[in-house]
Amino acid sequence: MAALDEFSEIVQRQVPLAPFTHLKLGGPAEMLAQPRSVEELSRLVRACSEAKIPLRVLGCGCNMLIRDEGVSGLVLRLSEPAFTQIEVRNDRVRAGTGASVASLISASARHNLAGLESLVGIPGTVGGALRTSTGDRSADLGQFVHSVEVLDSQGRVQVRHRDELQFGEQANNLDDPVLLSVEFALQPDETDLIVKRMRRAWMLRKGAAPAAFQAAGRVFKNPRGLNASALISQAGLERTRVGGAEVSDRDANYIVVHPGATSRDVLRLIELIRTRVEEKFNLRLEQELTVW
Ligand SMILES: Cc1cc2nc3c(=O)[nH]c(=O)nc-3n(C[C@H](O)[C@H](O)[C@H](O)COP(=O)(O)OP(=O)(O)OC[C@H]3O[C@@H](n4cnc5c(N)ncnc54)[C@H](O)[C@@H]3O)c2cc1C
């Protein structure tokens, strides 16, 4: 696309996206860019806006299913050092949205800062986790956010402060196209206590999740006061299979992907689960997994 000619050093065409996602499924991106600085990213966002090119940001692809036919427009990956830095000052931790949640948690714990340790074991980047309001019953990332630096649709840097942000259950009002960095406000605590809580959270999460060797994705949000895994189990759907996609027997809110599976298999299984749960409980499950 001529509109993006000046970005030829960082934009590639027809790039398979499957390797960049947890499920390893789906087709290519029409264009993929890995900008090297905020300034370059900002110009790229502006150019896309002017040329009306759809723009999306891919984190680690842990909450993502790419359709077999691929994605039109531009996909951004914020994997260059300008977007993955983590800085700690007093009780504040500032993380680029391309940094992993794991590195954010370990940097905080190393500086005796508590709060995020119960999220240990949740895969993804800080940007993806914030966008999807990642968390569990013990905590969610949003509750520790002090401010978020974003790019608006014109590529301008803006700061969203705590008082204008709302973090609800599995949702928030951060709708800017690109999240750049996040400042977290944490609580000082003793290292031993942080590590102990981290170990406990790790064991609980690993005990419940599908086995580590399985490619598996969480599918639905928990309906208010209910648990999606329990509803899917009670509808008798554990181990239900469509093509190469199967409902996990360890946590029914995960779909496990076997060799040879396609995105279409996963989408058909999702629809089957939704229909059966609706028939049994008269309740329509809302999807957590992002589909491009
Ligand atoms: C095994 C497994 C266990 C999981 N356990 C949990 C759990 O316990 N609790 C929980 O809440 N979730 C869980 N998840 C879901 C997932 O980990 C989170 O949603 C995750 O943090 C997503 O991060 P990501 O970088 O992979 O985002 P992606 O999947 O790449 O993207 C998710 C969304 O975020 C957007 N996005 C990503 N980065 C940016 C950015 N910088 N700016 C703007 N938008 C952006 C994408 O466009 C997309 O809409 C689990 C997933 C797996 C596979």
Image (cartoon, rainbow, N blue to C red):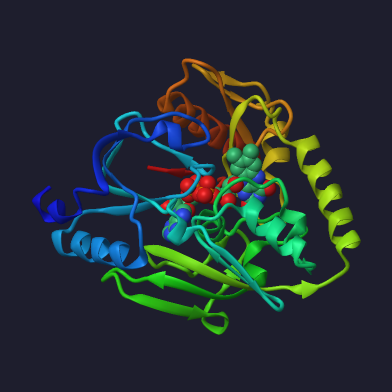
Task: Give coordinates of residue 144: x percent, y percent.
Answer: 67, 71
Dividing the picture into quadrants, the one containing residue 62 is top right
Q: Answer left or right for 197 relative to 111.
A: right
Q: Where is residue 186 in the image (x, y as percent from the top left)?
A: 72, 73
Q: In the image shown, does 3 or 221 lie closer to the viewer?
A: 3
143 left or right, relative to 275: right
Count of numbered badges drawn on the protein: 0
> Residue 270 placed where, x, y %?
51, 33
Relative side of 204 to 48, left or right = right
Percent coordinates x, y for residue 80 in the rendering: 42, 53
Q: Residue furthest bottom?
A: 163
Tell whether 186 sits left or right of 50: right
Residue 287 in sight in this render: no
Q: Nearer the viewer, residue 94 or 142?
A: 94
The structure residue drawn at horizontal position 86% and vertical position 63%, both measured from the top left corner, is 191
Residue 176 visible here: yes
**Residue nearer the viewer, 184 or 168:** 184
Q: Residue at x 68, y 61 (%)?
A: 140
Instruction: Look at 70% across and 30% down and name the residue there.
Output: 210
**Residue 171 found in image quarter:** bottom right
Relative height, residue 210 to residue 282 (above, below): above
Q: In this view, does 72 lie above or below 85?
A: above
Up the image or down, 151 lies above or below 266; here it is: below
Quarter the C terminus occupies: top left
Looking at the image, which is closer to me, 244 or 94?
A: 94
